[in-house]
Image (cartoon, grey):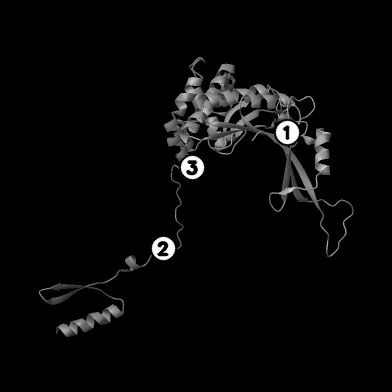
Amino acid sequence: MLYAWHCVIEKMNHLGMMCVSPNIHNDTQRFIAMKYSRKSVERKAHAVPKIKFEQQQLTSFAGLVLLQPFLAALDFKASLARCFRHVRAGKVYGRATVFLQLIIHLLLGYRDLRESTYYRDDPMVKRLLGLKRLPDVSTLSRMLKDATGPSIDRLRRLLRRLVVDRLRELALARVTLDFDGSVQSTTRRAEGTAVGFNKKKKGARSYYPLFCTIAQTSQVLDFLHRSGNVHDSRGARAFIAECIGLIREALPHVIIEVRADSAFFSDELVTLLRDQRVEFTLSVPFERFVELKGMIETRRRWRSFDANRSFFESHWRPKSWTRSYRFVFIRKRVARQRKGPLQLDLFVPHEDGFEFKVIITNK
């Protein structure tokens, strides 16, 4: 009898009429059959699903989460607030918060203030600044007027302190100071701008600040704010002496080295670095010195540095200088540009030329 029921249930399962669920109890197998209804089988296929937009907190700047513990470890916001403690309070947005937003603005790759609208609703930026609502562009512009001379001096001191603290942690044996100017163009007639040499945007007003950079860490130690119509060496001597004194006072046992391009080459600067017992490497504008050009033209034996570069050195004293220094002459093999009408030949002969550079050093 059990075998007969088993045959019937197997046949009904094969036809899709029943669902079998075996259950073992007291060594007897019992079967419970359940019939499907049409309602449980069929469904509407023509209905369009309903689309809903959820209020989820999404961000395009999730990388800022790494910046939050870093700024907290430095107590950076409180340090910024101390730079503006002399300014009258009473604003809705704190000045330290506004300047921190400007730093984040630059880290995100933006330059114009109006571009802050791209992240004004971003939850990660609000979290980092500790705000529920970011200030408008007009608010940022108005609060920048509070950055007076004393505020800028305090900001520069804060920058120098952070860099020096990092150098103390690294315990470097040598600190290399690189000095170079950078043209910062602007389309406005802003305070402190002027029309000067601008290779990329000729005739545009610009700033021309002088930066002191730590070569080992790529950090900006300090800067000298200048208008765009000044020479590279304007105020450079006093600024270089100030940066050297800062490093020597904070790290008295390190070897200080100074590097700069040909715009800073002068007897006064070289004498200053020698008197300060600082190692230096300066590029020389050898086009101005006929004697140096003559040394290069008459030189026959060059010491090879690699496949494309060679050098020689000589001690030389320029006119009106008080002593001689070590000059290193470097030449680099480059492909010479062909001028004239283009000739479509199968084989085009390539001519090599040389680029020359001269440096002065006490190393």
Mark 3 to mark 2: distance in Å? 45 Å
Give the crowd class for mark 1: few <14, some 14-19, many >=20 residues within 10 Å.
some
- The secondary element bearing badge 3 is classed as helix
- Is residue 225 visible in this depiction of the protein? no
Mark nearer the N terminus (3 vs 2):
2
What residue did someone put label 1 on?
262
Q: Is residue 163 above or below residue 154?
A: below
Total count of labels = 3
Under mark 1, the amino acid is Ser
Using the image, tell me which numbered label, if any, was put on residue 44. 2
What residue did someone put label 3 on?
63
Image quarter (top left, top right, bottom left or bottom right) of the C terminus: top right
Mark 3 to mark 1: distance in Å? 40 Å
Camera-near label (3 vs 2) is 3
Mark nearer the N terminus (3 vs 1):
3
Camera-near label (3 vs 1) is 1
Q: Which of 305 and 70 lies nearest the eye of the viewer?
A: 305
Residue occupying the point 50% across, 14% down = 88
Q: Is there a contact, CB below 8 Å, between mark 3 and mark 2?
A: no
Q: Which of 167 and 292 lies nearest the eye of the viewer?
A: 292
Q: Is residue 212 above or below residue 296?
A: above
Residue occupying the point 66% across, 28% down = 209
Using the image, tell me which numbered label, if any, was put on residue 97. none
Camera-near label (1 vs 2) is 1
Mark nearer the N terminus (1 vs 2):
2
